Each structure stands twice: as C-alpha cells, then as structure tokens.
C-alpha cells in the first residue's frame, strides 16, 4: 500500500482495503435482483443479509436494526426526519451541539425554518467536549430530539454518549447519534449506549464511498425515507446497492477484527508524532484534548503560530506529497470560510487560519510520520523565512 | 486547485527576503483575509530595477503573487512597469479559481503602486 504513504486525511475518507477490493471483484458478475425469487436472486439477498450481520456486529446491533443507506449524510437526515415528522403537528425543541456535521446542522435548520421547531444549540468546552450538564440545562418538556455526534471529525473528541443517552431515556426523548467518525476507530456498542439511532458510513473505515447504514432501535411506525418496492423493511425502497453493501459488510468485518490492533497502532503513531513535532516546533499547540484522553487517537488538530495553514498544506502537497486537511479556506474576496467547529471552541480567526488536521489510518507507518514531521518543519521554515 | 505557475512560485519563492538599502518599498494588505505583502527594491541610475525582494504573510497564492511580481520587476525599467497593460497583468498568475481572484487584485494594486515609484530615490 505504498500509494498511501503521504496520506494523512483518513477522517475525510479512507482507501478501500485489499479485502474489500477482493470481495468487490468477486461480486462483479452478480446481477440478479435481490428481490427476485430465483435462486440467483435469493443468493444476492443472502449476501446482503450477511453484510447486514457484519455491519450489525460491528456496533453490537441486531441485523434487523440495520437499514442500508447511501452514507452518513443520508443516515443523519433520515434519523432526524423520521423523528421530527412524527411530531410535525406539535413542533417542539431540538437539542443539538454546535459542532455537528453539516448533514445534521442543515436538516435541523430546515425543520426550524419550515416547520417551526425551536433549536437549542449546545456549545462545547474550550477543548471540544459536550458537557452533560449543558444538555440537562437545555431540556424542555417539549424536547423531541437530542442529536449529538459520538466523535468529532475535526478535533477527534469522543463525547459522553452513554451519559447523554441516560438523560434522554429518563426524559423519554429520542436520541440520535452521528457515529460516522467513531465507528471503525473505537468500540461502539449500541446496546450498551442505549441510543435510539446511530449513523455509520463505510468510506470512513475502508469500505466503498456512497454506502452507509442507520441503526434504528425501533423501526415501528417509521416514515419511509424512500417510498417504493418495500426493500429495507419498506423504509428505503429501491433495488439495493449490492456492490456497496458487499463492500461495507467486508469493511465492517475487518474493522471488528482489527479494531484493537488499529487503536494500539494509533497510540504509537500519535505519541511519536507529538514528540517529534513539539521538539522541532515547540510553540505548536493541540486544539483538541491535550493528552489524547477521550479523543480519537488517529486525529490531531494543530495550530502553528505565525503561519497560514493553507500555505503549509499547499507546500506539503506540492513539495512533499503529503495530504492534510484545513480549518479555514479562502473562499473569495468577501468571505473567509472558517471551520464552525474551531469557531465553536472559541479559537480566534488568526488561530483558525493557522490550524490544520492530521488523521492517521491503518496504512500509516512510523516512517510516514517521521517524514511528515520533517515535511511540516521544512515547510514551516520556508514560510517563516518568506515572512521575514 | 492551484495552476502550475502558482505552484512553481510558492514552492520556490526565490525572490523572498529583504533588501539592505532599498530605494523603494511597497506595502499591501488585504483586509478580508489579513494577507500582507512588502516589496523592496533597488533602482539603478538608468531607472532599472536591479534588485527586488518580498516578504509575505498569507496563503500560498499570495506568496506566489509576490514572487511573480518581484520576478517581473527585476531588470525592468520603471517606465516599462508603469506602462504595463492590464491584460499582461492578468496573464501573469495564469488561470485562477474564483477563491483566488483576490490575488489578482493584489497584483494589480502592486503594479499600481510600482507605477507611482519615482526614480529620484526618495522613496524609502
Ligand atoms: C461526523 C460526520 N458525519 C457525517 C458525515 C457524512 O458522511 P458521508 O460522507 O458518508 O455522507 C461525515 C463525513 O465527512 C462526518 O465526518
């Protein structure tokens, strides 16, 4: 997998694993409709159900609780829509954090604008954590939905989902969790967590893009997402994305098997990276949790004073063939696009412009980390000399 | 995302630095993104720019813009710089994405300021 040496953006997406590619190659010639009663059709249905079992196993769910979707965004949209459509006659309050993915923030805004729901936005702490007392304080008798992500894509913070689920359950409130960044990086068990729904996306854990799933604890009286031929228990009609589902199943199987190995690997990469980087650039800062506690160990959000992360990233890509991700982008002359997550934890514009994210994956090697630190340091020196 | 001219110029900003005793100094800031460029240079008796260097704080395209500008000034007569056509300025950065247009505006402003340099070496 030498091709991925300079890739440090695994939170954005991952390459498909060899095992996933192999399963997809085997599946190229499958063509029967999984709903057909022919032998080949039933075979395809069985393959889908096996993938459903692997996906369910990864998050401690039952196969019947898994609905395949086109990915994390669709799963998030579906979960929120399904819950809120049920109380459309009596719109109430939605509790949401300010650091959710746009697929959550946008649909919540939509329900506010179109149907008159009110929204309570929970701000994180300076280090990116959603504190349970802020949820408690936000509760109203008419709260219809709490939606909080399990792990943040930019900072890596792991939120206290179990505690929030307890609050939600005690108050009989539906609790949706965006698990897209968590699943495949940390153990997730929906039984233990007692959440009502949880989104996952295959391309974040070495599966194909454009396929994901929603765990839905109770699928009675669900508003179908796509009305159609009754697939996915009538919740999402349309002939199944067979290739995508096969790839996702295999990716889920591998993630479950390899999770503890990957976590140990990330621990080593993280500590090597921090040691080397802070030695070379002592005034660099971690925007997320300092000690890596309650944090995705593959994710580091960093700030380097006096330079623009955009220029750093450009040098890294074009001179050193390293890919990282940015907290701010120049959009045009009038507006500067600053990360809503970094804004939410109170970083100044100047700090956001100097911030970037590194995310490791299973193919990142110790040697890649050493090269990355060296590349960051060299680029930093170029930028410092250019600015005089 | 970046065209080859921009990549070449931010990857190898060969004209960055300061001039020991400059005959002129041009300063430019972009209030929206906070980018800043300072260009300094030396002018010979026959009105030719014999040295030009820049310092820049900003995105990759800003650094490239400053480097391209300094490279253009070098060994050119002040009159030629004053007379540069808008079309020529537009060509210097190559094809840009909308998010990078502000660098073209910065470049135009740099040329405008360069056009105001008088050669009697009073500019410091
Ligand atoms: C936290 C989070 N939620 C949802 C999504 C969307 O997932 P997908 O790309 O599968 O639509 C992402 C992907 O960037 C994410 O990071």
Image (tube, helix red, strand yellow):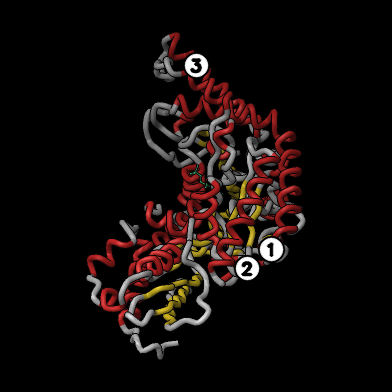
Question: Farthest residue in the top direction?
Answer: A39
Whole-Å distance between the Cαs marked 2 and 1?
8 Å
Q: Earlier in the sequence, mark 1 or mark 3?
A: 3
x, y percent for residue B96: 33, 58
Judge left or right: residue A204 versus residue A91.
right
- What element does badge 2 sit on? loop
In the image, B102 versus A158, the foreground residue is B102
Whole-Å distance between the Cαs marked 3 and 2?
50 Å
Q: Is residue A270 above or below residue A64?
A: below
- What element does badge 1 sit on? strand
Q: Earlier in the sequence, mark 3 or mark 2?
A: 3
| Mark 3, other Cα within 10 Å: few <14 / some 14–19 / many ≥20 | few
Tell me the residue that label 1 is attached to.
Answer: A285
**Foreground tag (3 vs 2):** 2
Q: Are marks 2 and 1 on the same chain?
A: yes
Picture quarter with the C terminus of chain A? bottom right
**Foreground tag (1 vs 3):** 1
Tell me the residue that label 3 is attached to.
Answer: A26
Which chain's residue wears label 2? A
- What element does badge 3 sit on? helix
């Amino acid at each position: 997998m030498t091709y991925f040496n300079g890739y440090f953006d695994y939170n954005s997406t991952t390459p498909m694993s060899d095992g996933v590619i192999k399963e997809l190659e085997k599946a190229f010639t499958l063509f029967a409709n999984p709903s057909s009663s022919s032998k080949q059709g039933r075979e395809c249905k069985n393959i889908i159900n096996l993938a459903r079992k692997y996906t369910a196993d990864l998050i401690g769910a039952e196969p019947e609780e898994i609905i395949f979707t086109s990915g994390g965004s669709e799963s998030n949209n579906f979960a929120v829509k399904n819950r809120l459509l049920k109380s459309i006659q009596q719109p109430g309050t939605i509790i949401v954090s300010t650091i959710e993915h746009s697929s959550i923030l946008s649909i919540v805004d939509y329900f506010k604008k179109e149907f008159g729901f009110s929204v309570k936005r929970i701000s994180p702490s300076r280090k990116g954590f959603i504190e349970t007392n802020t949820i408690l304080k936000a509760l109203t008798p008419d709260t219809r939905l709490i939606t909080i992500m399990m792990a943040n894509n930019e900072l890596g913070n792991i939120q206290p989902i179990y505690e929030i689920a307890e609050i939600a359950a005690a108050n009989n409130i539906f609790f949706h969790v965006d698990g897209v960044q968590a699943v495949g990086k940390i153990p997730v068990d929906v039984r233990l967590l007692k959440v009502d729904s949880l989104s996952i996306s295959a391309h974040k854990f070495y599966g194909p893009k454009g396929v994901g799933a929603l765990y839905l604890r109770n699928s009675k009286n669900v508003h179908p997402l796509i009305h159609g031929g009754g697939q996915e228990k009538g919740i999402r009609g349309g002939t199944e994305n067979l290739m995508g589902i096969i790839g996702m199943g295999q990716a889920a199987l591998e993630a479950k098997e390899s999770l503890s190995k990957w976590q140990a690997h990330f621990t080593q990469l993280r500590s090597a990276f921090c040691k080397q980087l802070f030695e070379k650039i002592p005034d660099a800062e971690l925007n997320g949790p300092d000690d890596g506690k309650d944090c995705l160990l593959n994710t580091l959000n960093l700030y380097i004073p006096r330079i623009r992360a955009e220029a750093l990233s450009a040098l890294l890509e074009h001179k050193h063939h390293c890919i990282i991700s940015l907290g701010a982008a120049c959009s045009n002359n009038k507006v500067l696009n600053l990360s809503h997550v970094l804004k939410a934890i109170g970083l100044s514009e100047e700090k956001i412009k100097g911030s970037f994210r590194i995310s490791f994956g299973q193919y990142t090697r110790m040697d890649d980390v050493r090269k990355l630190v060296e590349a960051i340091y060299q680029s930093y020196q170029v930028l410092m000399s250019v600015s005089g | 995302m970046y065209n080859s001219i921009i990549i070449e110029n931010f990857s190898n900003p060969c004209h960055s630095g300061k001039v020991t005793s400059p005959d002129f100094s041009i300063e430019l800031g972009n209030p929206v993104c906070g980018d800043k460029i300072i260009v300094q240079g030396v002018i010979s008796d026959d009105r030719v720019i014999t040295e030009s260097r820049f310092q820049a704080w900003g995105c990759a395209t800003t650094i490239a813009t400053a480097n391209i500008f300094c490279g253009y000034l070098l060994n050119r007569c002040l009159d030629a710089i004053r007379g540069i056509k808008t079309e020529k300025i537009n060509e210097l950065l190559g094809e840009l994405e909308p998010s990078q247009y502000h660098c073209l505006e910065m470049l135009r402003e740099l040329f405008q300021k360069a056009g105001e340099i008088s050669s009697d070496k009073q500019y410091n």
